Image (cartoon, coloured by chain):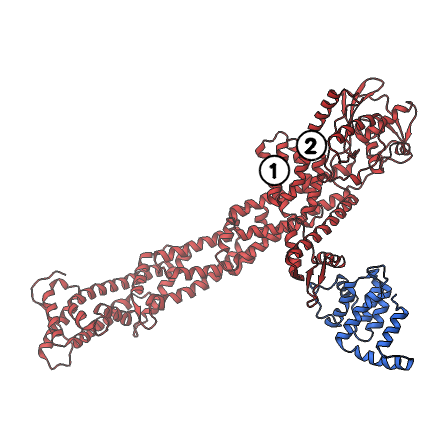
Chain colours: A red, B blue
Amino acid sequence: MAMSARRLKRKMQAPKLPSTDPQFDKSFELLAQAIHEIHRKNASNLSYEELYRNAYIMVLQKRADTLYNGVKEVISDHLELVAETEVVPAFVKTTDTNARMSADAGTSFLMTLKRVWNDHTTSMIMIRDILMYMDKKHVKPANMPLVYDMGLELFRDKVIRSQKHPIQAQLTAVLLDQIKMERRGEQIDRSAIKGAVDMLVELYDQDKRENVYVVDFEPHFLETSSAFYLVESQALLAECDASEYMRKIEKRMNEEYNRTRHYLSPVTEPKIRNIVETQLITNHAKTIMEMENSGLRPMLAASAIEDLSRMYKLFSRVPEGLNEMRTYIKNYVLELGNLINAKVDSANDNTKPKDKDGAGAGDKPATTTGSLYTALRWVQDILELQEKFNKIIDFAVLKDKSFQTAVNEAFETFINANPRSPEYISLFIDENLKKGLKGKTEEEVDNILDHTITLFRFIREKDVFERYYKQHLAKRLLFGRSVSDDAERSMITKLKVECGYQFTTKLEGMFNDIRISADTVTAYKDYLDASGIEKPKIDMASTILTSTFWPMSASTSPKWIMPAEITDACQSFEKFYYGRHNGRRLTWQPNMGTADIKASFNTKRHDLNVSTYGMAILLLFNEVPDEQCLTTSDIQAQTDINDIDLRRTLQSLACGKYKILIKEPKGKEVDTTDKFYLNVNFTCPLARIKIQTVATKVETESERKTTHEKVDKLRKHQIEAAIVRIMKDRKTMDHNLLIAEVVKQLSNRFNPSPQMIKKRIEELIDREYLERNAGDRKSYNYLA
Amino acid sequence: MGYFTKDEWMDGMRNLNVTNNEDLKAKIFDMEESLQDERQFKDFYSFVFPFAKTKTQKSMDVEVALALWEIVLKDRYAHVPLFIDFIRKQEPIKVVNKDQWTSFLDFCKVISVDLSNFDPLSSWPVLFDEYVEWRRDNGL
């Protein structure tokens, strides 16, 4: 206000004061007039110093109280007038049915209120300045509201919370109406609302210890919002699919956030967010997930990363929100996994042997190719499934560990539900370590192996896997089928990392044997040269296998009758070897070798590469005139080869692509009375022919049973060893603790049941390694 | 089956102050009374196994065991006839080893006839687990 010394021109009626002090009255009159002028925005005519001085003197004269109350009354009266003459007329007429008109009327009301408020605060600042001395010396020490604050309280009580006029209700109604319109998508005047909100925030309610915005307005806002979103959620569910619905939720959430940022108070933000989350997400999470064509299941099937990501973000806002989603995903993975398993079951049902006359050029028995294919397909399917869900976990759920765990649990469950999983996975690795890897870079190879290791981790019966891996590795090494030595060693290193060195020492032993054998053969040749001993007629290269490493053992070596032609060579080598390694025993393994045979047919000579058994059989025909035959039982008698291998070998010689022998009657099945003739008219464009017999194939059901019996036997030993080891260390142990410890120690090989362990304990009690504790049945003592 | 030599018999009778049948009859009542004491009974029960089994074998033929259980534990524990029935019908074993014999007494003492306090995870010999399972499967 511009200060000048000009006197007041007009006088107004001053309130009657109870006074005994004309001096005071006069001073007060002055001030009261000044306040009126201020209210009338005529402050420029006032003298600040004079008014200040007046107030100052009044305080000195100990009339501060009267002054204070007097001022209060003046302002109060003024505000009541303002309420009646300015605010109420600006009310929105309920007769306005046109929405736009009522919106504008609402804005208008707010702006009026804002103006009134601004005027008031401006006035109060001036009034406060005048009465500053009183504030400092009287009001503050007396713990009364300072002049400015008193002004705010008056505004609150006389205008906003006016008892005479429903201003409060009107204000709330207008604000809520505006917000409702904006939620419907219409434009409103945000600054007008902000003005009103700021005003409410500045006003304080001492009793509730909160500002008026929070006490008077916010509860209504939250209530109507809640109702609004309740309805909104139903509407959206009715018309949107899951993806759209979630996008709408996001939109609404952003909208409300904006609202609190731009014109409501920030304290409302968490509360309204809670409401939106509850109404739109919490109450309907399940419905969204289960939507028929657009819910979680179709999203997963299509790997719809964006939608899944949105769902994850939204659901993570509400308590328990992610639990359902996680469980849903886990069950879906399980379902898909079980389907993959079912494919195997039905494939195996379909590959029962077909009719006997299936022989055609170059087809292997349908069962073999069929089930190998099934096994590889199974692994491939699972790898693809894993890849799919790895993507989902990485990109849609932000690598959330709990989701990863849930998915892993599902994998573990269905992988182990397939009893052949260890075999299949080993076959897959086998396939990739011989043929599949050719042409792939080292990096690609490593990649495939890494993925296979992740599957290996899920297997519970790791000892079964080890057994198969050894068998397959043995065949690869002995028949020279590994494509890359590096890849083989890389795989073993990875297994070592997973399972510890015990798992892999034997495998490495196998490798060493191959290497050492090569050296031994060279040494043998040198020895023959150096010693001048007559070289045997047959050139032979032996591979010496240390029996503990390899999956065959000396005691179960298949028997046969060694053909006379090679006895010399064998004995010569044996003599050499025993000379070097006294105390070792060699047992020839006829099921594992190969032989190159020069065969003269009528048209041409061919070099045949056959298995050792094949050699034994073919050599028989050297003694048989061309027109004569040998029956299966003849051959059996002269070679003493076991039934299964005999039939397999005969099939490879007579029923395969290259028919070295002619079988009567034709057909794949080999009966004891079948006749075999040497096929003297055999022709083939190739000079050198390889007759395959020992392809790695999936075990038959009975072979699998045998494998498992062997594994079970081994497990019994391992359990007992673990029990003894633990008891020796602890001397005394409680039953349940012992069981737990045994399980723990064996956990990276297989999972023994408590029953299995109990049986072994009883065995050990019977053999007096342990005894039951006399005092406490539930524990055991170690017997040294 | 177990036996006493003549010397063992005579020594034993002398220690009991028994010289004729009348004395023996009287003594038998006393002895049966003494078996009411749990410790005495337990000693007696433990004695039976090594005594009655075939000396050259480590374990006892199952038929012998069943007969002995019937005699020794008759009327004391309700499990006995049920257990014998189980062994006869299910035929899980051919011999009974020391651990099973000894544990059976404890089992009868501790586990109620209705099997309500039986815990399959506890340290009872597997044979008893199978007995419980058999009873439950057959609703006995």
Q: Quadrant of the C terminus of chain A?
A: bottom right
Which chain contains the residue that carries disc 2?
Answer: A
A546 vs B113: above or below: above
Q: Where is residue A614 shown, x and y percent of the image?
A: 82, 29
- CA gap between label 2 and label 1 equals 26 Å
Amino acid bearing label 2: Ile
Q: Identify which residue is drawn at 34% across, 58% down.
A: A263
* B89 horizontally vs A377: left or right: right
Q: Identify which residue is drawn at 77% across, 47% down.
A: A705
Disc 1: CA contacts within 10 A as few (<14), some (14-19) or many (>=20): some
Q: Where is residue A119 shown, x and y percent of the image?
A: 22, 63
Q: Quadrant of the N terminus of chain A?
A: bottom left
Query: Does the residue at mark 2 contact the one at mark 1 (Cβ under 8 Å)?
Result: no
Residue named by callout 1: A448
* A371 horizontally vs A279: left or right: right
Which chain contains the residue that carries disc 1?
Answer: A
Q: Identify which residue is drawn at 13% across, 77% down.
A: A62
**Residue A514, numbered circle:** 2
Which one is in front in this view, the residue at disc 2 or the one at disc 1?
Answer: 2
Label 1: state its secondary structure. helix
Most foreground residue, A429 or A295: A429
Most foreground residue, A178 or A294: A294
Visible residue check, residue A28: no
